[in-house]
Image (cartoon, grey):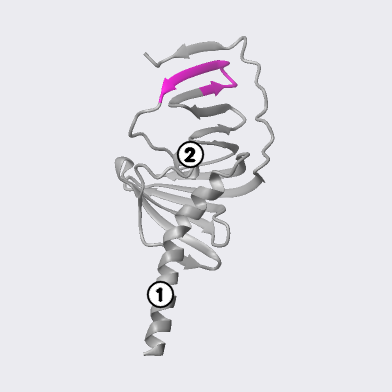
Amino acid sequence: MKNIIIISFFLIELLWSQNSAYKNFQSYMNVDGGVLLDINFYIKQSKNYTESNGLFYYFGDMHYSFDIEEQRITHNNGVITTINKNTKQIIYDLSTENGISILHILSGEKKGIELGDIILEKNNYKIPFILDELDVRGVLWVLASTGEPKKITLESYDDMKIKIEINPLEVGHMKQIPFIDTSEYEKIDLRD
């Protein structure tokens, strides 16, 4: 009887810790002062392969910017601002109510994400998920002790595969996003 109680206790603790893995990730991402991540994208679709690297600035409450050499995408209060540094254009658009992107996953947003059974693997939690609206399945790896994101893989049913490697740079005391002088940029407003 004593062994059954001990085994039951460990099973309950294991289930609780796995259920809290995504919550730990959300807490990590929503720390006061923001989070700065270095992100490497590897995208393969059919015979095409693309690599990209950028900085993901997460300020909290679905306010984030993703900055790469050619452009910066900022999401804030339902407005998406895309700054194309090469063509010197700024495009303003509204995010769709049910829209979801890879950047939403990194922000800890759970809306539109169906979580699968969480697995502890080599000091990391492997959190499978499905993005129903996009017909995509993926896995988020987070450090078990802190919820720090390490990697995301995504696969769509049309043969697209995305691997995202994540390296935290600043947590809780993030520096300011670099200023871009857009005074001479063409502005396109699609919010109407």
Q: Viewed as shown, does residue 1 lie left or right of 188?
A: left
* Amino acid at pointer 1: Leu
Which percent across, then down, holds residue 14? 44, 70
Instruction: Name the mark nearer the viewer: 2 or 1.
Output: 1
Q: Quadrant of residue 96?
A: top left
Which percent across, then down, holds residue 59? 57, 35
Residue 40 within the segment the image draws in magenta? no
Q: Viewed as shown, does residue 148 lie left or right of 20?
A: right
Q: Name the residue carrying label 1.
A: 11
Q: Is residue 102 above or below residue 144?
A: above
Identity of the residue drawn at 48% across and 35% down: 62
Q: Quadrant of residue 37?
A: top right
Tell me where the magenta segment starts and ends, as one range. 82-94
Q: Residues within 10 Å of mark 1 (few under 14, many from 20)?
A: few
Q: Provide the major secondary structure of the magenta segment.
A: strand
Q: Is residue 126 above or below residue 83?
A: below
Query: Nearest the camera: 45 or 183?
Result: 183
Q: CA distance from mark 2 to mark 1?
A: 34 Å
Q: Quadrant of the C terminus?
A: top left
Identity of the residue drawn at 49% across and 62% down: 125
| Secondary element type, mark 2 | helix
Q: Name the residue carrying label 2.
A: 103
Q: Quadrant of the N terminus?
A: bottom left
Upstream in the sequence, badge 2 or badge 1? 1
Residue 91 within the segment the image draws in magenta? yes
